[in-house]
Image (cartoon, rainbow, N blue to C red):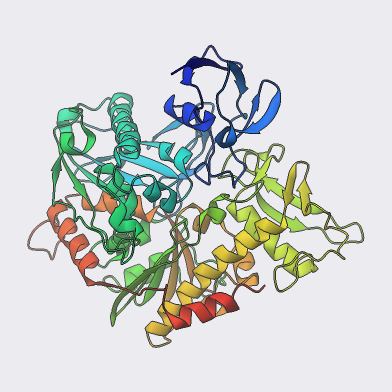
Amino acid sequence: MKKYNVRFVGTDTVVRAEEGASLLDVIRANGIDIAADCGGRGRCGKCGVVVDGEPRLACETKVVSDISVALPERSGAYDILTDFGGGVTSAGGGTVTSGVAGAGVVSERAGTSAGAGECAIAIDIGTTTVVAKLIGLPSGEDVWAVAELNEQRVYGADVISRINASMDDSSLLSGVIVNQLDRMVSKLLAESGTDAARVARVVVAGNTTMCYLLLGLPCRSLGLAPFEPAFQFNEAYTYNEVFRADTLQAPVHILPFISAFIGGDITAGLLTLDGKGGEQHVTEAPSAVIAGADPQSTPSPAIEAEENANDLGSYILVDMGTNGEIAYHSNNGLLCTSTAAGPAFEGGNISCGSGSVEGAISRLELANGANKKFRYETIGGGAAHSICGSGILDAMACFADAGIVKPTGALNKKSPLVTEDGVPIAEGVTITQKDVREFQLAKSAIRAGIETLISESGGIIPDRLYLAGGFGQHLDPESAFRIGLIPEALRGKVIPIGNSSLAGAALAALTKPAAANAASPQTSEDYLKTAGAIASRGREINLATHPTFNKLFMEHMMF
């Protein structure tokens, strides 16, 4: 078959591509980073390139001659949560501050020497981001962290896109994540000066699809009814079995899932909050302040944890990612569900949306006075070029308050702030009618999921609502209440907890010194058994055919 040259403008890269090949596939195959939220189906418009001076979508362009391709400019830093309680390592251009990570590879020195003793590695595989953290043993102190964007995201922003690409053969996406994580592990060791022989174990947490892809398992059972995972995880694997490399000789443990769409990331979060270790982490979480509450009248979670050492009461844990995982823990048991929120909270499927990158609008309000205009903050403080999840949430609250959007979600064309294209927020950043609809679907899915679990629990309002993940960490609770993302009954009970998935993986890697009243230390084996028990006792509520959910979903589409 005939081949042509594809030259990437501004670089020395020239690749050969077969005639008729998709330009997006050519870009992917050569490891070049490009957004493709819809998985290359021509819907999101994020894979825009310039081919021989003409703007095109890479997914809709076939290589039929020698071409020159100008890729979109990459944003600088990308904030990735690396700590429980909201620690973030902000980076870009190699600059790192305390606690999220940058656009490519970002490392964080946690301020603790690796010492000479044993270490463990905790890994969180998110749909959008991945984090690997080196932990000193037995103390559990953070030593080093590396965080990156998940390189699978060029195959789609959500798990459904990844499943569809891996129904019977997951080797392509499996190779992507396996190679990425092994490289991150090598980076952890090299940058921290840690000998590989000192790593005692590796513990991985992630949603079910991400872990299936890590293990190279076909995803058909996750993508077709009755959505029952065909494969369970082993108690332990060799490093080579998982990563197909000999970087470490340590065993690898993958935290168990509850169901096809309620994964080990939720198991890890529940393990973190569980009385067998959760109270320590809640006490230590630096930013676990109850959002929306009066700080003078509401006890902090640290105080509550100390007073109620082994009982956090009833609570709901929500990860507002693309998979919308929700768990309700009470004395009556553990109810779990997932709802297809989609990637809108992470800027996906939003025309000018992005993740938490430099230049993304993260806070927004409508100024008072006759000359109404939007005031906003961007990540990094520079010029706005996109809007991330927390900014979109604020925008929707502003639209509802100012009558820019009707209760049905339709843009009010009588508003002077609404143009033919939508609502301009900043130069080059406009919220369209389609964007509003995408957000409505996401917020209604989460709200209806929360209320369905409350209904299944006898209508009992939980004591706390824990928000896991980046969007939950950075959202403005008032905006969330205003547009109906969170029920009013939970006002004063909302606690953002950061990366609880990574925290749970780290906890399961520990061997804690024996407490004064304990007969023996709590070992990694103990924590892993507890994680297994959590996964076993979780009862899934299927929302697809649930009459309460369907009714609530339609109701909460309204603003």
Say if residue 99 shows up in the picture. Answer: no
Question: Residue 78 versus residue 527: which sits nearer the camera?
Answer: 78
Count numbered badges in the picture: 0
* Residue located 30% across and 42% down the image: 170
Q: Which residue lies furthest to the top in this view?
A: 12
Residue 321 screen position, x and y as percent: 46, 56
Say if residue 190 shows up in the picture. Answer: yes
**Is residue 175 rendered to the left or right of residue 527?**
right
Residue 557 screen position, x and y as percent: 61, 72
**Is residue 94 rendered to the left or right of residue 380?**
left
* Residue located 84% across and 57% down the image: 417
Question: Residue 223 versus residue 496: which sits nearer the camera?
Answer: 223
Residue 115 screen position, x and y as percent: 23, 32
Q: Residue furthest right?
A: 370
Question: Residue 525 versus residue 75: which sits nearer the camera?
Answer: 75
**Is residue 201 rendered to the left or right of residue 545?**
left
Relative to 240, residue 317 above or below: below
Which quarter of the picture shows residue 546? bottom left
Residue 479 screen position, x and y as percent: 64, 65
Relative to 277, residue 173 above or below: above
Of the 4 image quadrants, the one containing the C terminus is: bottom right
Relative to 36, residue 526 above or below: below
Question: Residue 275 versus residue 332: which sits nearer the camera?
Answer: 332
Q: Residue furthest bottom?
A: 458
Q: Residue furthest left?
A: 519
* Residue located 71% across and 22% down the image: 53
Of the 4 image quadrants, the one containing the N terminus is: top left
